[in-house]
Amino acid sequence: MPIKGPAEFPPKDDRPRVIGIEFSPRTLIILVLILSGLWVLNRLLPVILVLVAALLIVGTISPAVRWLEERRMRRGLCIAIVFTGLLVVTVFFITMTIPALITQASDLMDQVPALRERLVNWLAVSPLTNSLADLLRDWQLGDIVRMVASNAIAFSTSAIVLFAYILSSLFLALYIMIDRDRLRGGFFLVVPRSHHIRLSRILLNMESIVGAYIRGQVITCAFMGAFVFILLSVCGVSNALAIAVFAGVADVLPYIGALLSVGAAVAASLPGGPTIILVVLVLMLTYEEFESRVIVPRIYGSALRLPSSVVLFSLLAGTVLLGIVGALLALPVAAAVRMLIEELRVELPGQQEQAEDIETRVRDERGEEEYEHRTEGMPAEQAAAIAVEISTDRHKEESSLSTKTDAPVADDQSG
């Protein structure tokens, strides 16, 4: 084979390559629509959060309203009873905790000079904390008062805005409960009739997810309140019940709630001296760690059918994206995404169809045929009610079947 000489090789092109990227008009339109949608969502974020809060309230009180309706009571009267009970509980909580907290806060402000002197003397004993004692000795109470006064206007404005959002969520939830049939009928009207059964199952599961999330919140808050009450009572701290209720309610807030609970308990234990303060601080921090690592993953994991790793990851992701609000909504959103994947029969990569999936699809087709036969020629509101009835009956049937299948397993394990 002849070897080419240098002159026979093609000349090398030293010019830089230019890679051109061209977007089709359709791609540009899609990008513009996506960016416009994200901008609109960002601007309407407070409104969306109010709507989400209202839906959470509706999902929370709907089981109570349904329970009263099953006792042959009119729906309007049931809604009035439930909302009145909610208002009474809120007023009772405010009257039981806020005055005691204000009284204790004023008492602490009067005792600040004596407490500071006692703490300075305790810190000055050790060479390691001597510098901290000097810093605390130079710290004047007037500096704290001026700092609080300078931020009072901004804090009061934020509190008023938050209170307005809470009222808006309550009234929106009330309107949604009153106009349930009309809103549900309009929702079903824009969805093809062949998907009504699946839509009703999604709505029913969403209500179950909200209920499970609220139950988890109630359990964790009750545990926190009981722990703080027992701890402060054993340590001889005054107003232990008020501080315990405050800590239990503050536990609703992820991360920030832990700081508020620990801060309130430690502040209440200041008159007891350094030993009581240290005991309360160590035990509160220990319980907060135990709650975040053990109680929260187990309770919410079983209630929302989420693995513990998904619970922790959802809380972290929600906090990074939307702060406290994102952390509050992270778990129900994660459970809703998991439920939508199951109900919409989304095939994930690596997943193979099982016999249970085929049986579920057959039941879906049977339910849709029954629904279309029963609702032929009906308006959307009546058809939506029948779809919910069929989905509820099927949900009860599946729950009873799962209970029967789980019973022998439990018996085998116990034996």
Image (tube, rainbow, N blue to C red):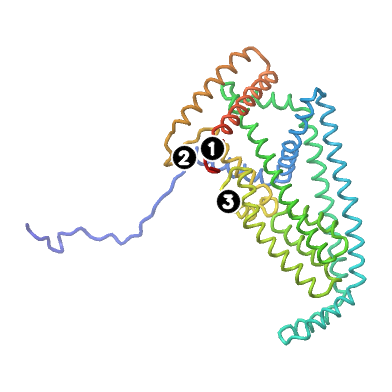
Q: Are marks 3 and 1 in contact (CB under 8 Å)?
A: no
For label 2, the residue is: 348
Q: Nearer the viewer, residue 261 or 269?
A: 269
Mark 2 residue crowding within 10 angstroms, few (<14) / some (14–19) / many (20+)? few
Q: Position of residue 138 (x, y in %)?
A: 83, 82
For label 3, the residue is: 308
Q: Are marks 2 and 1 in contact (CB under 8 Å)?
A: yes
> Is residue 268 placed above or below 136 in the rendered structure?
above
Q: At 59% from the left edge and 13% from the top edge, which residue is drawn?
A: 373
Q: Position of residue 61 (x, y in %)?
A: 76, 36
Residue type at tag 1: Ile
Residue farthest left in this picture: 1
Q: Nearer the viewer, residue 277 or 203?
A: 277
> Is residue 70 placed above or below 82 in the rendered structure?
above
Mark 3 residue crowding within 10 angstroms, few (<14) / some (14–19) / many (20+)? some
Q: At 10% from the left edge and 61% from the top edge, which residue is drawn?
A: 3
Q: Nearer the viewer, residue 289 or 44?
A: 289
Residue type at tag 2: Leu
Which picture quadrant has residue 121?
A: bottom right
For label 1, the residue is: 341
User: Which of disc 1 and disc 3 is earlier in sequence?
Assistant: 3
